[in-house]
Image: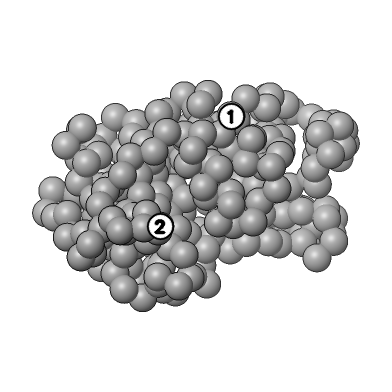
Amino acid sequence: MTDLTLLSRIEDAGLNASAPPQQRWMDGWLVRFSPGKAKRARCINAVAEGRLPLADKLRQAQAVFDEAGLPLVLRITPFTQPAGLDAQLEALGLHTEDDTRVMACPSLSALRALPLPAGSRWQSMDGSAFAELIGGLRGSPPGQRQAHAQRLALSPVPFQAYAIVREDDGALLACGQFAREGDLVGLYDVFTPPEHRGRGHAASLCSRLLVQAREEGAAIGYLQVEGNNTAARRVYHRLGFADGYSYHYRSTAAD
């Protein structure tokens, strides 16, 4: 996918959907320092070049992250400014983390909701309950779950969370949420418990999230997925998503 205007809109939508209350601007850098698990909510996005020398900006940002008790992390995308920042950070010894792909579906018009698994039901969830659920599934400590719930509650882009649960015992088969901003909808926190994977539950969940968002006005889908998560990427490809661009992080923390 080479529509740079669309990809730039998707990048903006992703930034809006991941906005935590703990953020500030610093000479062209959007500095986020949420104590939650999501790295996109506790990193620096270099949106503009700014005027200060890089060393000064890093020193100021380091103080913010030190105060928050977090490692300094910068997110590097094709839209990062200046274009040579990644090479500068590498020369300073910051190592790379988390190769991530942003995938997009440029048209949701032909998508159909896949059937639910036999003996299951579709269940909506509020943000607090969802943050607790997904945090428990991922083994996140209480502080990170609380930060996630706070970010969802205060997000400038509203989230809707849903789960597929078994009717007889309420066991979770899959869960996820979407954030719609105008005609763009992003899928977030899609999760299938290990014991239920490989049965089509994630495809059923995602198709229903996207169709519901389409009924509310969405026309284009996007998501972020780890580059080495081949199983998830296969699901998204079957739903009509293709790679748009990749990003990674640079960190001062030890591997």
Residue 129: x percent and y percent? Answer: 49, 38
Which image quadrant is residue 217 in? top left
From the image, tell me which residue sits under label 2: 172
- The reply to whether dot 2 and dot 1 touch (C-beta < 8 Å) is no
Q: Nearer the viewer, residue 167 or 191?
A: 167
Which part of the image, by quadrant, shows the N terminus?
bottom left
5 is higher (above) or lower (below) than 203: above
**Neighbour class for label 1 at 10 Å: few (<14), some, many (≥20)?**
some
Residue shown at the point (47%, 50%) measured from the top left: 189
Say what secondary structure mark 1 lies in. helix
Q: Is residue 237 rendered to the left or right of residue 133?
A: left
Which part of the image, by quadrant, shows the C terminus?
bottom right
From the image, tell me which residue sits under label 1: 150
Q: Is residue 230 rendered to the left or right of residue 148?
A: left
Residue shown at the point (58%, 29%) measured from the top left: 150
Say what secondary structure mark 2 lies in. strand
**Neighbour class for label 2 at 10 Å: few (<14), some, many (≥20)?**
some
